[in-house]
Image (cartoon, coloured by chain):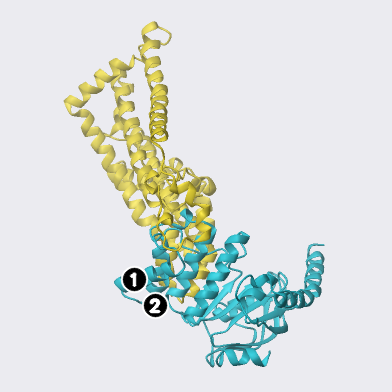
Chain colours: A cyan, B yellow
């Protein structure tokens, strides 16, 4: 953690304190440690990216923060209060969109508002506002299967933003998209983040994506997942082609070096698991 | 069997929806870069020629289908007349239709049709009312599913027809036993499809809804039920076909009215024309009923694409 990134954002929003998650392997006494002793603070309004080799427990960590599962040990605090279950103060965006196929784009965005108990008329207004925000004006009556992958993810993002959570949890949201769509969505996500001031935890396995989006990048080890290092990312300017900036390359290389050993370890585990 | 039940035809309506041409992608204030992927396909309005071609194709398709039916009717007419088949047992279709018209005018046909329809619709309706809630319950609560599944396994592999004597034994040969029999037979496809509809809901959708803090009841109402509707409708459509099929069988075995009775009684008293009139009637009713249900099924599954 660098001092400069500390000054940019507020106090602690999410406090992950010594969290471990152990799963019971089905029909046996064996246990499986997904993540181990993870401690990490995410500050109010911060954009934190989380990278790690596949199967390192990134998604498990996100489930815990979402309240969809409970940690085996340790605790997770949101605004100083222990998280005990899911809630509308946190919104999740999944890689596979998870849109309700029987609902139109607009009705999908309204879903969380219904859960929140917002009046019908206000729901439609709000949903339309967020549809505009993600650049899908006029697509309100389209069903998910009538939209491209990028558009579906825009709807999913709008759905999570619409019920106005403080925290946005994103689980490799752009991994299934083509490179061009991904870059434009990354750019738009940053502008939405700047506009809304949400605290964002963004999981990715792409180093470039992590550097491009994150104010800080947390690197996880291979299974059992632990936080290996947290790197503050700062650029003098974000004008022009940021990815061509020499500083971008340096961050990229630094992360690549950190991840190289972990990816190798993860692969060895996978091979051992299959064999 | 459960698997084959759900694999009914699920026509996608998106392919035939010319109304979506010139989509709003064109008008969006800030053109999203990824919309370009779909914009050309939707943006280009279908030319007049392609629309005419499509209409012609549709007409051609209808013609082709009518052609096969026409050919069948022609054979039915010609074969008895030329003596290839015995016209005593298979009178030409035109003569059967004359007999059909006679039955219609005398009111006899209407009475039998009404008797049959009341029985099958009553049984079918009761099956919908009973089997859907039961299926939802079994699909939703794992303990219930585990408890009843051996019984379900047993019964769904037992032909309802095998149980007709049991119905007759317990409920007699009156209306109650026939309606109950139809009800029983119709319940299975609806029940099994409802269970599988609830069970096969994408877990990610449930996770997504749960992350928004939905209670179990709301989750059921807002996610499981709508997700299961197309599968449930497939079951309903199958049950519709069953309702007529098994009723006819019941009416042939023991009844004083109904189309099954008409067909069977006409045959045994050698009113061959009337027998065919009854057969024609039941096949037309079956066809119309199925068309109606297919139409309804499609309406409720517009969003389903695979």
Of the pair B215 and A159, the residue shown nearer to us: A159
Of the pair B221 and B147, the residue shown nearer to us: B221
User: Quick check: can you spot residue B58?
Assistant: yes
Residue A149, given in percent of the width and then of the height, sits at 54, 58
Judged by depth in the image, the label closer to the viewer, 2 or 1, is 1
Of the pair A30 and B126, the residue shown nearer to us: A30
Which numbered circle lies on residue A116? 2
> Which residue is drawn at the image coordinates 60% and 92% (left, top)?
A7
- Tag count in the figure? 2
Residue B292, given in percent of the width and then of the height, sits at 33, 41
Element under label 1? helix
Q: B8 left or right of A14?
A: left
Instruction: Give the spatial CA distance, label 2 vs label 1.
Output: 15 Å
Of the pair A164 and B212, the residue shown nearer to us: A164
In this figure, which residue is indicated by the disc labeled 1? A125
Contact flag, marks 2 and 1 (Cβ < 8 Å): no
Chain bearing mark 2 = A
Mark 1, Cα crowd under 10 Å, few <14 / some 14-19 / many 20+, is few
Chain bearing mark 1 = A
Q: Are marks 2 and 1 on the same chain?
A: yes
Q: A4 left or right of B161?
A: right
Residue B10, given in percent of the width and then of the height, sits at 46, 45
* Residue most extreme to the top: B82
When the figure is inspected, residue A106 is found, relative to residue B151, above or below; the finding is: below
Quadrant in the picture for residue A129: bottom left
Mark 2, Cα crowd under 10 Å, few <14 / some 14-19 / many 20+, is some
> Which residue is drawn at the image coordinates 63% and 61% (left, top)?
A179
């Amino acid at each position: 953690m660098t001092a400069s990134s500390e000054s940019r954002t507020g106090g602690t929003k999410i406090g992950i304190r010594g969290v471990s998650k152990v799963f019971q392997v089905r029909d046996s006494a064996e246990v499986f440690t997904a993540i181990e002793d993870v401690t990490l603070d995410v500050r109010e309004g911060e954009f934190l990216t989380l990278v790690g080799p596949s199967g390192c427990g990134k998604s498990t960590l996100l489930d815990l923060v979402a309240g969809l599962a409970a940690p085996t040990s340790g605790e997770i605090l949101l605004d100083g209060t222990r998280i005990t279950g899911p809630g509308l103060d946190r919104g999740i965006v999944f890689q596979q969109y998870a849109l309700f196929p029987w609902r139109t784009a607009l009705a999908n965005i309204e879903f969380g508002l219904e859960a929140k108990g917002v009046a019908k008329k206000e729901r439609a207004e709000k949903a339309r506002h967020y549809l505009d925000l993600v650049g899908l004006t006029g697509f309100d009556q389209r069903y998910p299967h009538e939209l491209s992958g990028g558009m579906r993810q825009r709807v999913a993002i709008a759905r999570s933003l619409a019920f106005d959570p403080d925290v946005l949890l994103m689980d490799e949201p752009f991994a299934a998209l083509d490179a061009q769509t991904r870059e434009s969505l990354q750019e738009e996500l940053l502008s939405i983040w700047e506009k809304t001031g949400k605290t964002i935890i963004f999981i990715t396995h792409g180093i470039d994506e992590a550097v491009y989006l994150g104010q800080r990048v947390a690197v996880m080890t291979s299974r059992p997942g632990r936080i290996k290092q947290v790197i503050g990312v700062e650029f003098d300017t974000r004008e022009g082609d940021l990815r061509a900036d020499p500083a971008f390359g340096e961050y990229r290389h630094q992360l690549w070096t950190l991840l190289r050993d972990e990816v190798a370890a993860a692969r060895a585990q996978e091979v051992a698991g299959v064999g | 069997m459960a698997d084959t039940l759900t694999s009914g035809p699920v026509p996608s309506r998106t392919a035939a929806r010319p109304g979506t041409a010139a989509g709003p992608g064109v008008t969006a204030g800030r053109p999203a870069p990824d919309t370009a992927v779909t914009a050309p396909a939707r943006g280009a309005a279908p030319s007049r020629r392609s629309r005419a071609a499509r209409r012609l194709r549709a007409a051609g398709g209808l013609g082709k289908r009518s052609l096969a039916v026409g050919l069948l009717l022609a054979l039915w007419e010609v074969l008895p007349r030329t003596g290839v088949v015995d016209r005593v047992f298979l009178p030409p279709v035109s003569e059967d239709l004359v007999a059909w018209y006679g039955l219609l005018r005398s009111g006899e046909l209407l009475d039998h049709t009404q008797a049959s329809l009341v029985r099958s619709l009553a049984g079918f309706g009761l099956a919908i009312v009973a089997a859907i809630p039961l299926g939802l319950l079994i699909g939703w609560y794992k303990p219930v599913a585990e408890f009843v599944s051996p019984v379900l396994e047993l019964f769904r592999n037992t032909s309802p027809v095998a149980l007709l004597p049991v119905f007759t034994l317990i409920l007699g040969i009156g209306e109650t036993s026939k309606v109950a029999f139809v009800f029983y037979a119709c319940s299975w496809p609806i029940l099994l499809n409802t269970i599988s509809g609830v069970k096969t809901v994408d877990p990610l959708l449930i996770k997504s809804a749960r992350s928004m803090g939905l209670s179990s009841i709301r989750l059921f109402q807002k996610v499981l039920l709508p997700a299961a509707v197309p599968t449930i409708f497939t079951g309903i459509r199958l049950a519709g076909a069953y309702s007529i099929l098994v009723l006819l069988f019941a009416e042939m075995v023991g009844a004083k009215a109904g189309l099954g009775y008409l067909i069977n009684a006409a045959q045994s008293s050698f009113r061959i024309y009337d027998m065919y009139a009854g057969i024609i009637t039941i096949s037309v009713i079956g066809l119309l009923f199925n068309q109606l249900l297919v139409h309804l099924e499609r309406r409720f599954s517009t969003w389903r694409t695979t």
